[in-house]
Image: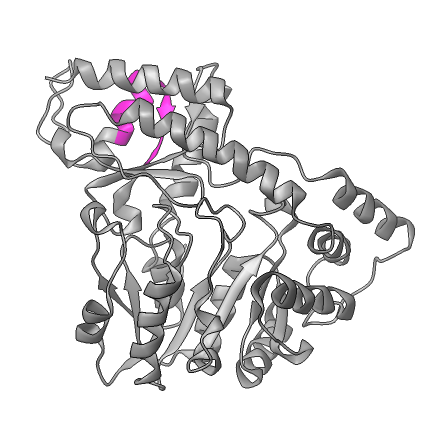
Amino acid sequence: MEQISKRLASLAASQTLAMAQKSRELKAEGKDVINLSVGEPDFNTPDYVKEAAKQAIDDNYSFYTPVEGFGDLIQAICEKFKNENDLEYAPNQIIVSAGAKHSLSNIFLSLLDPGDEVLIPTPYWVSYPEAIKLAEGKPVYIPSNIDSGFKVTPEQISKAITSKTKMFVFSSPSNPCGAVYTKEELQQLAKLFAKNPQILIVSDEIYEHINFTGKHESIAQFKEVKNQVIVVNGVSKGYAMTGWRIGYMAAPEWIAKACNKLQGQVTSGVCSIAQKASIAALRGGLEFPQMMTEAFLRRRNLMVQGLSNIKGMKIDSPQGAFYIFADVSGLFGKKTQSGTVIKNSYDLALYLLSDAWVAAVSGEGFGNPECIRFSFATSDQNLEKAITRIHEAINKLQ
């Protein structure tokens, strides 16, 4: 008899991965699908990073690695925090993991007890609530929408805090909406959490380098809350290294020690070759991330201009990452040519995939069911074609 655990059965499948899979299946059938569901840069890993990996192979880095990561990679991470963020971290505060998702799972599994509440602003990355549930925590959602710039206020957070609140988790720049909290906004959040020292702050900064505001700001810069902050980052987005699977966290020593203990029993240390490549990435300067950011900014402008005049679709110009999170609630209730009613963003995503051959991700999985996420991590030519197809498909709705 096939019987999975209740723990796993309670988890939702990742909508982003599901839509990407549908897109691949249609492409395999010969359909000209433009995939705007993808959550990774469309650039190749820099050559200097690849060369470092090849050298590591030749140097026989083929053995088990320390659970917390190679010492020279940890040192490079500490240097990155100091040079780019003016943050001081000691090596014993850093844990290297198999991607930022792995770091987040380590945090939740190491620190949450059954019933502990974790505050999550909406929209959120799809894996936050599921990873929290897996750790037997309870997600508590704080709503935002396109009119608030997809940001939450200290007042909203304060109202959501209870005696069971253990964490607050957020991302800036944000997946799926590209919202970026300003230094002033982060300072106001810091003031609130300084009054609630029992609450840990998980700051997901994986999109740090894809930032159109000019300068990344971390909530860890505020001394009054630094001992409450766990920064999660990695090389995936900033250096086009999604498949290399290297993430890391910086945290108070006791938290790093706890996550190290867990990781030692689950995965142990991560890939030796990928770690050596990541050292080259972190020490190779910011020219490559800046080149990508310039391309993504151009593509963002192309998408905003192309989609903003669609009746029934409301667009907010993202300040970071590579997603448009459009409010499409104005299209709910319309019918396709076959008579199918568009009841929600999932219906619209399926319609765009079947009628326009454009793959996007509905907002349900991100906590904002009135929205749909379009990635602009593809070529300008593909984006122009996708915009035309989306216009044509929406115009067919009755």
- Residue sitting at 53 percent across and 59 percent down? 100
The relative height of residue 226 versus residue 282 in the rendered view (above or below) is below
Based on the displayed image, in which of its 4 quarters is residue 119 positioned?
A: bottom left
The spot of residue 353 in percent (x, y) is 33, 24
Q: Residue furthest right?
A: 59
Q: Is residue 46 left or right of residue 133?
A: right
Position of 92 with respect to 314 (left or right) is right
- Residue sitting nearer the eye, 271 or 171: 171
**Which residues fall within the magenta stretch?**
349-361
Total number of numbered labels?
0
Above or below: residue 270 compared with residue 330: below
Q: Main secondary structure of the magenta part?
A: helix
Residue occupying the point 31% across, 71% down: 188
In the rendering, at what x and y percent does residue 26 appear?
Answer: 43, 22
Instruction: Specify whether 62 is left or right of 244.
Output: right
Q: Nearer the viewer, residue 73 or 286?
A: 286
Q: How is the image coloured?
A: one colour
41 above or below 133?
above
**Image quadrant occupied by the N terminus:** bottom left
- The reply to whether residue 8 is visible in this rendering is no
